[in-house]
Image (tube, rainbow, N blue to C red):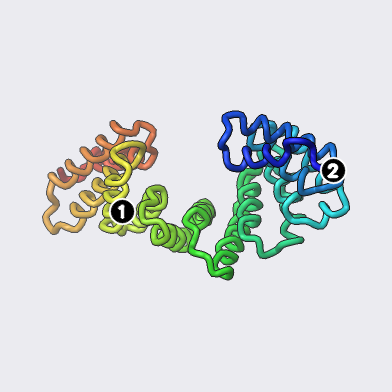
Amino acid sequence: MWAQGTREAMIAFFEGDDPRFEELALAGLGGAVSALPEDPKLRTLLGEAQAEGGLVAEAVGTLRAAVETESGRKDYLPWDMLGVALHLDGHSQEAEAAFGRALALAPGHATGWAKLGSTLMRQAPPRNAEAAACYRRAVDGVAAAGGAPDARLLYNLGSLHMRLSQSEEAAAMFSAAIAAEPTHVKAMGNLASLRNAAGRFAEGIALLETALGLEGRQGRLPADLAVALGATHEQAHAALPNSSPQALEEARAAYRQALASHPSHAAAAAKLEALEARIGHGAEL
């Protein structure tokens, strides 16, 4: 028999219809675990509630006890939640092991692969190649289950490819993320960076303008756009049979504008420095 009030506490926790729902849930679930100490599902629920309430160290202890029960050892969920709690508590290698145990029990669990990938990419040093392989499993798992493409998974996989200097793969994932979520500003910004780096400025500028329309002129997007516009002015200068001083002046103004809005913008600083060096060495203005 569950401790008195446990059912009501769990309802309050999951529906959030009581201002004290976390306190009630923790108290009720704690009582239930005391009454049924060998039930890993109750321990998992308690551990999840503790983690949600910021009691991460307590959650780790509760979930360790869950996977030590006979049935808990064979259940995906306690191992998965233990991995989450360990990750939150800063124990990334132990979290990796817990997620590994969970995925050995349920290898088709897409979000489990994403959690393992997230843990690997946050280790020191980051294990980005292995993390990318995990996110690839997650993306493929969603597709195999007939689910809609997950923009978050696609974006994270693209970011990992970007870290690994795999530009084509990264661009494909960012494009897929935007297709899944047309307002995904971060994916637009990263895809624009890749397009601009490849000299495909028209595409990059169009992406940045769309992102700015969605997010407003904040963050580094205005500086990214100014840098792209500056690069197009330099490109126009190089393409003209009779070099126009106006093109380089416009490029220099764009890079300065980028640095004014985002002083730590490394690309803007590098491009402005290179342009000033060209001018100093006699580039025609």
Query: To which quarter of the image does residue 261 belong?
Result: top left
Q: Secondary structure at mark 2?
A: loop
Give the percent coordinates (x, y) of residue 268. Answer: 33, 40
What's the distance in space between the residues labelled 2 and 1, CA to CA? 56 Å
Asked if the residue at tag 1 contacts the one at tag 2, i.e. Cβ–Cβ closer than 8 Å, the answer is no
Callout 2 crowding tier (Cα within 10 Å): few <14, some 14–19, many ≥20: some
Quarter holding the C terminus?
Answer: top left
Q: Is residue 159 above or below residue 85?
A: below
Disc nearest the viewer among 2 and 1: 2
The amino acid type, in three-letter code, at marker 1 is Leu
What residue do we see at 29% from left, 45% from top? 212
Question: Which residue is nearer to you in this view: 181 or 241?
Answer: 181
**Circle nearer the N terminus (2, 1):** 2
Q: Which residue is mark 2?
A: 36
Label 1 Cα crowd, 10 Å radius (few <14 / some 14-19 / many 20+): many
Image quadrant where one finds the N terminus: top right
Q: What residue sits right under mark 1 in the picture?
A: 207
Quadrant of the rendered image containing residue 19: top right
Q: Position of residue 8 (x, y in %)?
A: 67, 39
Q: Amino acid at mark 2?
A: Leu
Task: Name the spot of residue 158 as percent of width and height, x first.
Answer: 49, 56
Viewed as shown, does residue 250 lie left or right of 223? left
